[in-house]
Amino acid sequence: MEALSKDEKGVYKMLDTLITVPRFKNLYTLGALIASGYYEFKGFDAGPVFSVLGYNDVEGLRLRLGGRTYFGQNDLWRMEGFGAFGFKDQKFKYGLSGKVLVSKKNRKILFAGHRKDIEQTGASLTNSKDVLGRNRASSGLITVGANDRLTSIELTTLGYQMEPVKNFTFRVLGSHRTLKSASETFSLSYYDQNGDIKSTIKQSELELGINYTPGRKTSGYGVERRVINGGDFPSFFLGYTFGLEDVLQSDFDYHRIQALYTQPWNVGGLGRLYTTIELGRIFGTVPLGLLSPIPGNQTLWSIYNTFTQLDYYEFVSDTYASFHLKHNFGGRLFGRVPWLRELNLRELVGFRAVWGQLSEPNNSINVGIDNLPIRYQSPEDIYWEWSAGVGNIFKILAIEFNYRGNYLNNPGIRKIGVTGSLSFSF
């Protein structure tokens, strides 16, 4: 350890003084609230504030209050929870999760959680058992089209994670889910082995996951670390899920394999390109609630890795391959226009495509709301769409115009849409 110089000591003294200035404290609180979504108290953060109010056709106006323990960046354990209430269905929902760093060597973490809520399942292809993850699809204040294809879910998870090599994470997760439709206009019913109709799915699963993020840089040593070069490194994910029939009255025996590869690219003087490739396949016969719907997006938010001009469950698959591309020109074009140059606007373009198949057994097992067989479409001809937009509006806002490329004869389609997003970029 080396003694600090006079100037270095002065910097610390200045910072200690600065955090006592009311105006700076207010600006810091506002900045932290927008960046993290949490309002900071001593030892506790309330939020996420962006999830407090929501609306969907099942719950009506939805009020959600939650928070997490936070004593410092290097907390060795963390608890999170929320409670939500729908003023239309008059039902209370809740979730609770916790994680603890049991060993700093190889970052061994135990985690568990339980949630009873209403969710838009199929909002992403690569399944997540995040107990408290925010689902914009079921909690957006404003959506496009009907938002009634929602699922009542009760989920319990228990898992273990370790990092045997830097940026190489291994995870094993056990879970049990109970799924049923939350709406009278949407069905998750299916024919069982005896030909009888069942409306509730009970499923136990064992999941193995490997995540590799070469080049990722983090700070801190607690149960949660802060990524300091977010978006500047590739990510590889490989997952295997085994459906455990008859375990805790589980209904189905199946296997699921999934892979995800995300890569940012610096394209010389033409800006920054982000690409994602996602693959998956299900082996075995399962109903809609366990299949892989192609993730649509009926919100007004630009949500990466979804298809903005698709409705929920418009396409359903058990085998799929998707590709997403988004390019930020970094103002290379607008910067050449004198009256636009001072605004520091960013040009955005995107392209999204997906191919999928749905086997006959996995299609014919499903039952519609009228207790008659129902069939779902898969994008065997490769569905695609593209977008163009402007970013860095007022330093935080991006607006994109989205265009559907094919399957234009599907009923009730949206050929053109507008979405937005908020972000800081320095």
Image (cartoon, helix red, strand yellow):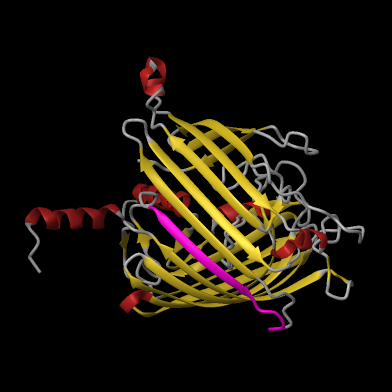
**Residue sitting at 49 percent across and 48 percent down?**
276
Position of residue 192 relative to residue 314, above or below, is: below
182 inside magenta stretch: no
**Seen in the image, is 374 located left or right of residue 79?**
right
**Seen in the image, is 251 located left or right of residue 114?**
right
Screen quadrant of the C terminus: top left
**Residue sitting at 45 percent across and 67 percent down?**
210
Percent x, y for residue 390?
A: 49, 30
Percent x, y for residue 234?
A: 39, 53
Can residue 293 be seen here?
A: yes
**Residue sitting at 37 percent across and 65 percent down?**
225
Percent x, y for residue 287?
A: 76, 64
Report the label total. Answer: 0
Percent x, y for residue 256?
A: 61, 67
Between 247 and 77, the residue placed more toward the observer is 247
Q: Give the range drawn in magenta.
A: 234-248
**Seen in the image, is 278 located left or right of residue 265?**
right
Position of residue 219 relative to residue 251, above or below, is: above
Between 253 and 88, the residue placed more toward the observer is 253
Q: Quadrant of residue 285?
A: bottom right
246 inside magenta stretch: yes
**SS assignment for the magenta stretch, majority:** strand
Screen quadrant of the N terminus: bottom left
